[in-house]
Image (cartoon, rainbow, N blue to C red):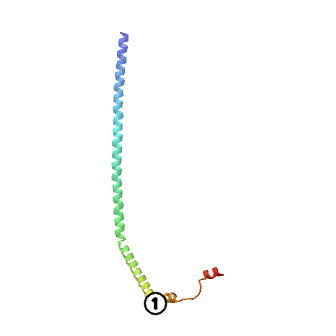
């Protein structure tokens, strides 16, 4: 019976090992599920933080924009005034010089020199 007793003890030991393995497998599975849940929670939390930061920066930008809106309109008015002054100056310059420019152009167009072109002279020599 010693052999039967030994076999029963081995069978009991094997059964204990199998149960321990199942328990360990359950613990590993629970740890994996816990890790996955913690990652999901961390992602959700970081998304909330990102949204809060984004909202804070947008509010900060709107406040900055509204506090500088007057400055922008004053600058735009100054630029518009300078543009109008420059356009008036250019128009005045155009009106004052257009007759002289047209006369110079017409003088050049109707001015005729009866001589051969310089390249033609070189070719003949």
* Above/below status of 40 relative to 28: below
Q: Quadrant of residue 29?
A: top left
Q: Secondary structure at mark 1?
A: helix
- In the foreground, 105 or 32: 105
Q: Is residue 7 left or right of residue 113?
A: left
Which x, y percent locates residue 67?
35, 70
Which x, y percent locates residue 30?
33, 36
Q: Is residue 101 left or right of residue 61?
A: right
- What residue is shown at x 36% (from left), y 54% (from top)? 50
- What residue is shown at x 38% (from left), y 76% (from top)? 76
Q: Is residue 87 left or right of residue 125?
A: left
- In the foreground, 89 or 34: 89
- What residue is shown at x 35% (from left), y 41% (from top)? 36
The N terminus sits in image quarter = top left
- In the foreground, 43 or 111: 111
Count of numbered tags = 1
Q: Pick out the residue farthest to the top.
A: 1
* Above/below status of 46 relative to 111: above
Q: Pick out the residue farthest to the right.
A: 125
Which x, y percent locates residue 39?
36, 44
Residue that badge 1 annotates: 99
- What residue is shown at x 35% (from left), y 43% (from top)? 38
Question: Local crowd at mark 1 within 10 Å, few (<14), some, or many (≥20)?
Answer: few
* Above/below status of 73 relative to 40: below
The C terminus sits in image quarter = bottom right
Q: Pick out the residue farthest to the front.
A: 124
């Amino acid at each position: 019976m010693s052999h039967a007793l030994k076999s029963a003890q081995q069978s009991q030991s094997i059964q204990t090992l199998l149960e321990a393995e199942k328990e360990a497998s359950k613990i590993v599975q629970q740890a994996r599920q816990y890790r996955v849940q913690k990652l999901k929670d961390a992602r959700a939390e970081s998304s909330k933080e990102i949204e809060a930061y984004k909202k804070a920066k947008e509010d900060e930008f709107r406040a900055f924009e509204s506090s500088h809106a007057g400055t922008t309109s004053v600058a735009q008015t100054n630029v518009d005034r300078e543009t109008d002054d420059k356009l008036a100056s250019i128009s005045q310059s155009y009106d004052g010089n257009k007759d002289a420019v047209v006369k110079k152009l017409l003088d050049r167009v109707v001015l005729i020199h009866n001589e051969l072109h310089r390249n033609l002279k070189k070719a003949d020599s």
